[in-house]
Amino acid sequence: MPLLLEDKRAIVAEVSEMANQAHSAVVAEYRGMSVSEITELRKQAREASVSLRVVRNTLARRAVTDTRFECLKDILVGPVILAFSMDDPGAAARVINKFTKTNDKLIVTGLSLGEQLLDAKAIEKVAKLPTYLEAISQLMSVMKAPITKLVQTLNEPHAKLARTIAAIRDQKEAT
């Protein structure tokens, strides 16, 4: 059933809005996948706050025009799914990468982080990016390490004296 012009404009506007809000996007070909497999992929994407859209390529090309994902226009060929990461730049890559490990019919054709187009092999690296909370945690541990080492260094002479006195006491008690 052909889409009306108003419907096409609404789809382009919706996908364009998603693209403007997203941190990253993944394009994957879903040729040969069953409805239940796509439904499972959509469920996993919802849980990770990733927006999935199956859109005609001509409409998708118009939607990503004048967005940071304009670099994806050339790889929008065939039946493709667009996955947009809304909160975490690596979320879409994690969902798609995890799903491709169990389903070989979903083939990643490319992804974009910001305005940079990455090839399909880069999905593993992007999927391993830490989440926001993990990045903050790593930063805090790096910032905490020198202070912890300083406190340990300042505390060591007192601790060494206490251990020496305890060793002398134990030695006198033993004799």
Image (cartoon, rainbow, N blue to C red):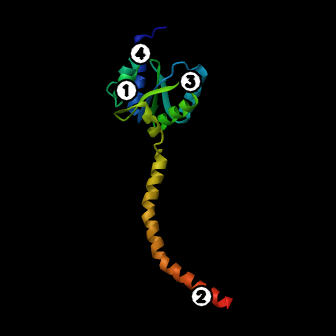
Q: Identify the residue under disc 2.
A: 168
Q: Nearer the viewer, residue 89 or 10?
A: 89
The residue pinned by badge 3 equals 38
- Of mark 3 and mark 4, the one earlier in the sequence is 4
From this viewpoint, which residue is outermost toward the top? 1
Q: Earlier in the sequence, mark 1 or mark 4?
A: 4
Report how far apart the C-alphas of labels 2 and 3 lie in the structure.
Answer: 72 Å
Q: Residue at x 52, y 25 (%)?
A: 106
Total marks shown come to: 4
Tell me the kind of residue under disc 2.
Ile
Q: Does residue 71 lie above or below 150 as drawn?
A: above
Mark closest to the chain's N terminus, 2 or 3 = 3
Q: Nearer the viewer, residue 57 or 125?
A: 125
Who comes first in sequence, dot 1 or dot 2? 1
Give the x, y percent position of residue 122.
43, 35
Displayed quadrant of residue 146:
bottom left
